[in-house]
Image (cartoon, rainbow, N blue to C red):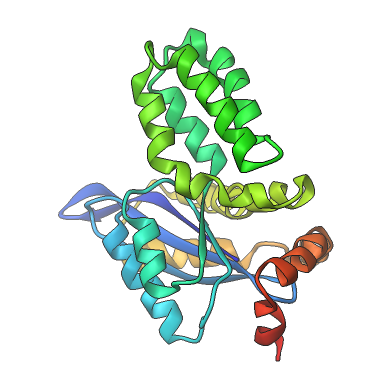
Amino acid sequence: MIFLDAIQVKIRDGQVANRPIYVALAVTVDGTRDILGLWAGDGGGEGAKYWLQVLTELKNRGVADACMVVCDGLTGLPDAVGHVWPRALVQTCIVHLLRNSFRYAARQDWDKIAKALKPVYTAPTESAATERWLEFAETWGTKYPAIVRLWENAWAEFVPFLQFDPEIRKVVCSTNAIESVNARIRRAVKARGHFPNEQAALKCVYLAVMSLDPKGTGRKRWMMRWKAALNAFDIAFEGRLTTARN
């Protein structure tokens, strides 16, 4: 599995502006966690075109296959993933989908919307999720049509994780695996304000990443957490994990 995300850092290039730092974190067939790379994007914000360059580089470096790629709802990113790894399932991060939903809603309705959406993403099957979604759309569609449109556009990338049992869903339905890494990066970046150039920003991010889990205890917990998921993946993805090990 590969988790994709980007964080914003302030870089002074003539003037101070936000620039994305792209991060790719992988879970290998042995259950270990590995950060595949860090890339500094341009000032236009996070973009699917740049992600295509990143994913192509990863494939050229030896990442021949990916079973699932978990990412936010960036438009065009699923197409970029499909171009590089045609057999990969693209999973939209449920946390990002919920956050984006709240952007279209009045704050006093956030709790109600969260409660109404929970049966959708905790449904036992895709058909059950569709039924719960139609109920949500009927109740809230008139007041918040943008939320309905958001979920409908993301539906194909929302449903893949529903084929797994609840324990496995917890580790594949969001970018939480990479969010903890990003939290450490953000603390390091925030402490320095802005950077004179992108190389300085990348060095800071790299050092923050290298300081993660110095004793290796987190790595052990991580591997134990992923054992059930890896066994299920080996069946769900037709032995592609076994092939990769060989």
Q: Provide residue 69's location: percent of width, then percent of height.
A: 52, 61
- Compared with 71, 237 (above or below) is below
Left or right of 209? Residue 229 is right
Farthest residue, direction left: 14
Q: Where does the image place residue 156, in percent across and percent down from the top left? A: 46, 48
Specify the quadrant that holds the N terminus.
bottom right
Q: In percent of the image, x 68 and y 78: which residue is there?
A: 241
Viewer-proximal residue among 45 and 149: 149
Between residues 229 and 51, which one lies in front from this camera angle? 229
Quadrant where the C terminus lies?
Answer: bottom right
**Residue 46 in sight here:** yes
Q: Nearer the viewer, residue 137 or 84?
A: 137
Seen as rendered, the residue at the extreme top is 108
Against 196, residue 101 (above or below) is above
In the image, is residue 192 above or below residue 59?
A: above
Left or right: 72 as drawn, with respect to 25: left
Which residue is at 35% across, 61% downward?
79
Q: Position of residue 119 (x, y in %)?
A: 65, 27
The x, y position of residue 30, in whole percent, is 74, 76
Residue at 64% of width from left, 53% of height from top? 172
Q: Residue at x 41, y 17 (%)?
A: 141
